[in-house]
Amino acid sequence: TVLSVPTGTTKVSIGLTNPTGQFAVSDGTRIAEINPHSSGTYIGNRSNHDVLFQVNASEKMRITTAGTVGVGTSANLSGYVNLPESDYGEGFNWFSSGTAANRGGIGHYSYESRIYYGASDNLTFVDGGPSGTERMRIAADGNVIVKKTAAGGVTIGADSDTSNTSDTFLT
């Protein structure tokens, strides 16, 4: 069957006579589908094959049958989300502008695990979400500040926040 529109349905298929989804395409082995659903739209397949995404006839992302995701790589997909090593490191990168000074990320580069941030930015650790309470800071100058709590706290190096006199300093 080249094209099928089963009588009494709104289903369309290519390569199938009785599609299970709204739009299905099959090569005889794999069945790819697009299906509307009450909570969104399903895009995938009904066969035990990875789902691939291409741009300009080149694979850019893969979701394996095990549920792992590869972005920019299809090899060694051992973690949940896998990204290849690049000039800015393997992992997640974010930008507040297009310059390297305003870039941050978590990943791996040159056989090292890294958390990195812009050259003039502080790396802060907070709880309670993005606008939560700061618990620790690595300042752009390399100083480490662990905020004072009921259990105590320390600052290693000089504290650039002179208004907070409850920090303890270790030099």
Image (cartoon, grey):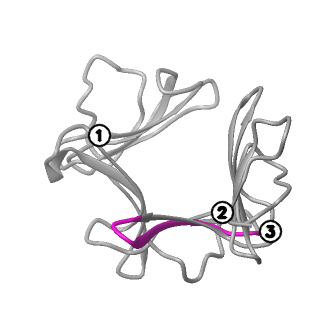
Nearest to the eye among marks 1 and 3: give it: 3
Label 2 SS:
loop
| Residue identified by numbered label 3 | 47
Q: Position of residue 58 (x, y in %)?
A: 39, 73
Q: Dividing the picture into quarters, in which one does residue 98 lie?
A: top left
Distance in Å between CA atoms under marks 2 and 3: 21 Å
| Residue identified by numbered label 1 | 122
Kindly identify the amino acid type of the residue bearing the numbered disc 2: Tyr
Distance in Å between CA atoms under marks 1 and 2: 29 Å
The residue lying at 28 percent from left, 16 percent from top is 163
Label 3 SS:
loop
Kindly identify the amino acid type of the residue bearing the numbered disc 3: Ser
The residue lying at 82 percent from left, 36 percent from top is 9
Q: Are marks 1 and 3 in contact (CB under 8 Å)?
A: no
| Residue identified by numbered label 2 | 80
Is 42 included in the stretch rendered in magenta?
no
**For marks 1 and 2 on the same chain, the one whose residue lies earlier in the sequence:** 2
Identify the mark at residue 66; answer none if there is no mark. Answer: none
In this view, the residue in front, 13 or 132, is 13
In this view, the residue in front, 115 or 9, is 9
**For marks 1 and 3 on the same chain, the one whose residue lies earlier in the sequence:** 3
Is 59 included in the stretch rendered in magenta?
yes
In this view, the residue in front, 34 or 166, is 34
How many residues crowd around disc 2 within 10 Å: few (fewer than 14), some, or many (20 or more)?
A: few
Q: Is residue 168 left or right of residue 96?
A: right
Q: Is residue 14 left or right of residue 146?
A: right
